[in-house]
Amino acid sequence: MNNKSQTSTKFKTAILPTLFGALLAFIVGKVFDPIFEYLYTLFLSLGGSFVTYISDSTYRKISDGFTDQATLYIFKIAVIACTYGLTTIFISAKYVFQSNATSTASSESNQHSEKLDHVMPKDLPQLKEYAEKLKLQLESQKRRLEKIEARRKHFDNFMYISTRIWIIITILVLIFNYSSNIFINNKITVMTNNIEIVSPYVSDIEYKKFKSDFHTIQCYRDYEDLEQTLQSIADAHAIALKK
């Protein structure tokens, strides 16, 4: 009975993440993909030299056809993981430094305490002089600890802000790249399908020219011109093109 229970538990442990991953992929594909594509389309419509450069680069990628994006995503994930690892090491080193500084201060304080514990009555005349020196040392130690604490607070604030900025930038970059890939793949699919749809109604030379025009796209205007040409052929023969 125990073996059956363990087998059932292992099966649930293995199958639940798979089902959750499949459900998440379905939700992203059906709900978020159109949103990301729409946002990227809005971005390309903003105008400006930088956006124009991104737009031209995007349509040149469209003309390249489908490419394997897995390696690119793996590389980005590796970069993020390495950055996170280095940040963790950096934070760990900071706490080691703070611990060492605190330990040193505590050690000095303990040494002074030991000296006071071994004071004998015959040493009382020297106690006042020693107390003055100890007071100066404790004040110096206090100032040093205050400086360490102030640096620690500044460092913590810096790490708090920079870490969150890094996380936000990373998320935005991943969303931007994901939206770009969705947009590119959708445009490739639509255009290649539409070329095939009108192919029965054009000559072989025109068909090859359409293919050539597609693979020589340099900007949005080139894509739009080819799109309008295919649409005019479709209208002339009362056929519907992909959108």
Image (cartoon, grey):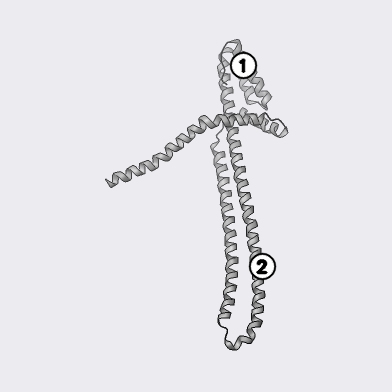
Q: Nearer the viewer, mark 1 or mark 2?
A: 2
Q: Which residue is mark 1?
A: 231
Q: Label 2 near label 1: C-beta < 8 Å?
A: no
Q: In this rendering, would 216 be left or right of 75?
A: right
Vertical placement of residue 92 versus 64, above or below? below
Task: Please name the residue shown 57% across and 15% down the image.
Answer: 198
| Residue nearest the observer in this picture, 138 or 52 | 138
Q: Which mark is residue 64?
A: none
Q: Which residue is mark 2?
A: 143
Image quadrant where one finds the C terminus: top right
Give the percent coordinates (x, y) of residue 200.
56, 13
Circle 2 Cα neighbour tier, 10 Å, few/some/many (<14 / 14–19 / ≥20): few
Give the percent coordinates (x, y) of residue 234.
59, 14
Which quadrant of the figure has residue 199? top right
Residue 139 in view: yes
In the current view of this chain or complex, which residue is farthest to the bottom?
122
Q: Amino acid at mark 2?
A: Arg
| Residue nearest the observer in this picture, 236 or 209 | 236
Circle 1 Cα neighbour tier, 10 Å, few/some/many (<14 / 14–19 / ≥20): some
Vertical placement of residue 203 versus 41, above or below? above
Task: Please name the residue shown 59% across and 30% down the image.
Answer: 37
Give the percent coordinates (x, y) of residue 181.
58, 33
Q: Amino acid at mark 1?
A: Gln
Marks 1 and 2 sit apart, C-alpha to C-alpha, by 78 Å
SS for tag 1? Answer: helix
Task: Please name the residue shown 61% across and 19% down the image.
Answer: 208
SS for tag 2? Answer: helix
Task: Please name the residue shown 58% across and 80% down the image.
Answer: 116
Give the percent coordinates (x, y) of residue 162.
63, 49
